[in-house]
Image: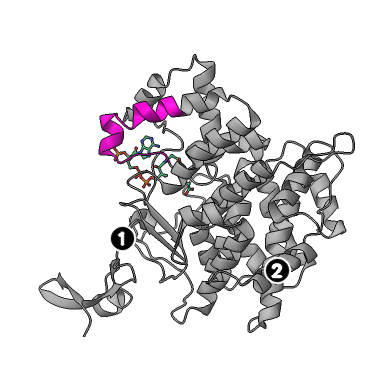
């Protein structure tokens, strides 16, 4: 008999099973709660709610641990590539040389975007945000490419995943080129996933792009660090929308929309905007920290705080080192990095930030790396989205194979008016 929790309601005791994960994390299984007691739980923002069991990513927010399929993210950032990490997330284990080669060939084979889709890109207003364009285009993919039917064979599933991973990257680069009114650059078969992206973004007939392996490496690490983060807002959106058995493209498109928000993936753009504002106001972060502390001011320090991490986000540590490395390599100085470091130094000693467990998250330093690579500010969240794709895909796949799978449909506690009658238009003074 496993462990149980006891719940007493109106003098009656109910027993609820306790589920323990492989890393010792415990949860009370309330799946029969309403059936047995007539009650539901209330948990705004789902901060205490586990929506599924998952074997993909492990996080310990108190200790600052992040592992994909058991492997620490620090090791993946040091030794792996984004493509290999994507394979690991989707398939569960690191690939053999043959498997990795096959996966890379597939990504190359599916990297082109249907030429008819070009018309879509060209008709978005030039100032449209690339996240809006990307979510629309991913949803539109269903019109151009086959849906994954239930009980598809492994080959069909792998092709669909490769199609998404490869084409989303190409679409991101196309939208950038079109937004600038420049000629689109096609993917090249002899370039790696990351190098190909940089080339599609920055190569031009008048100024050929010289691929710098250090920048390619920085991008590999950036994308590895963003590849999955268990049940975050956008992944939960993919699982929720996917639970209606909608096609994969629509589910991923929903994830992109969720990621767009400044409290989630949009924070990487918001951080740079905030650092720029501090820079333009003389470089002193103190007034911004005071604003963030003020309970009457809705301002938040962007790139600080996390729902799960109550200590330094392990990804932010790697990203901070990456900023120094990339800027040193480029022999460039970024005053925003100085401001970010100064801000962090003051904030982490501030009682408000200590009491609230607010530390830099992944977005705090990532924008400095993207700026150094040459990525424009409005493309930052798109970069996050490309990185998060393997996570969304693997979580969607896991939810499909889950024997306990159910349509996601939360309940609520209704606090609106009690039953009342319709008042006729005449009584409300409408002209007859
Ligand atoms: N600046 C100032 N105060 C903050 C901040 C912040 N960045 N974050 C949280 N707080 C305070 C908040 O005001 C509240 O204070 P009090 O209890 O006194 O009212 C308390 O901390 C708890 O806030 P919460 O919103 O209930 O906590 P949460 O777990 O929902 O917050 C968060 C998570 C990420 C939404 C929040 O920390 C935040 O808004 N951060 C800034 C945006 C940001 O950097 N987002 C990127 C997250 S990491 C990348 C990703 O996974 O998407």
Label annotation for residue 220: none
Q: Residue at x 46, y 35 (%)?
A: 302
Against 215, residue 2 (above or below) is: below
Q: Which residues are magenta?
A: 341-360
Against 278, residue 262 (above or below) is: below
Looking at the picture, how far across and down is residue 26, in whole percent? 27, 68
Report whether residue 175 is seen. Answer: no
Q: Residue at x 61, y 56 (%)?
A: 82
Q: Which residue is mark 2?
A: 101
Total labels: the figure holds 2
Residue 338 falls left or right of residue 59: right
Residue 158 is inside the magenta segment: no
Looking at the picture, how far across and down is residue 398, in whole percent? 52, 73
The one of 21 and 327 positioned closer to us in this rendering = 327
Instruction: Locate the N terminus and report the quarter of the image it occupies.
Output: bottom left
Label annotation for residue 42: 1
Looking at the picture, how far across and down is residue 362, in whole percent? 48, 44
Q: Residue at x 20, y 77 (%)?
A: 3
């Amino acid at each position: 008999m496993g462990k149980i929790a006891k719940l007493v309601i109106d003098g009656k005791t109910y027993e609820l099973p306790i589920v323990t994960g492989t890393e010792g994390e415990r949860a009370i299984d309330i799946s029969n709660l309403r059936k047995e007691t007539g009650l539901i739980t209330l948990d705004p923002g789902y901060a205490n709610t586990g929506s599924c069991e998952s074997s993909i990513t492990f996080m310990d927010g108190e200790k600052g641990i992040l592992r994909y399929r058991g492997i620490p993210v620090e090791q993946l950032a040091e030794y792996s590539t984004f493509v290999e990490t994507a394979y690991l997330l989707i398939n569960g284990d690191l690939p053999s040389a043959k498997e990795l080669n096959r996966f890379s060939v597939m990504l190359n084979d599916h990297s082109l975007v249907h030429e008819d889709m070009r018309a879509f890109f060209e008709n978005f207003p030039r100032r449209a945000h690339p996240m809006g364009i990307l979510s629309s285009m991913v949803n539109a993919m269903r019109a151009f490419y086959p849906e994954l039917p239930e009980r598809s064979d492994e080959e069909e599933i792998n092709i669909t995943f490769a199609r998404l991973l490869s084409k989303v990257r190409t679409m991101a680069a196309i939208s950038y080129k079109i937004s600038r009114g420049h000629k689109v650059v096609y993917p090249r078969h002899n370039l790696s996933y990351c190098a190909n992206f940089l080339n599609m973004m920055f190569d031009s007939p008048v100024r050929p792009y010289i691929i710098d392996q250090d920048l390619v490496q920085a991008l590999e690490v950036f994308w590895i660090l963003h590849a999955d983060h268990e049940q975050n807002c956008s992944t939960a959106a993919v699982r929720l929308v996917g639970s209606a058995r909608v096609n994969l493209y629509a589910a991923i498109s929903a994830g992109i929309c969720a990621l767009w928000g400044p409290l989630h993936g949009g924070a990487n753009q918001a951080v740079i905007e905030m650092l720029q504002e501090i820079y333009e106001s003389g470089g002193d972060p103190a007034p911004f920290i005071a604003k963030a502390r003020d309970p009457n001011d809705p301002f938040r320090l962007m790139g600080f705080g996390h729902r799960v991490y109550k200590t330094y986000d392990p990804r932010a540590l790697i990203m901070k080192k990456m900023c120094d490395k990339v800027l040193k390599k480029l022999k460039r100085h970024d005053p925003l990095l100085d401001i970010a470091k100064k801000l962090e130094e003051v904030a982490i000693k501030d009682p408000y930030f200590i009491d609230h467990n607010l530390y830099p998250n992944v977005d705090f330093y990532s924008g400095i790396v993207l700026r150094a690579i040459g990525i424009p500010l409005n493309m930052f969240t798109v970069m996050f989205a490309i990185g998060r794709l393997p996570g969304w895909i693997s979580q969607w796949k896991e939810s499909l194979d889950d024997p306990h799978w159910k349509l996601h449909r939360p309940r609520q506690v209704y606090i609106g008016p009690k039953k009342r009658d319709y008042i006729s238009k005449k009584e409300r003074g409408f002209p007859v």
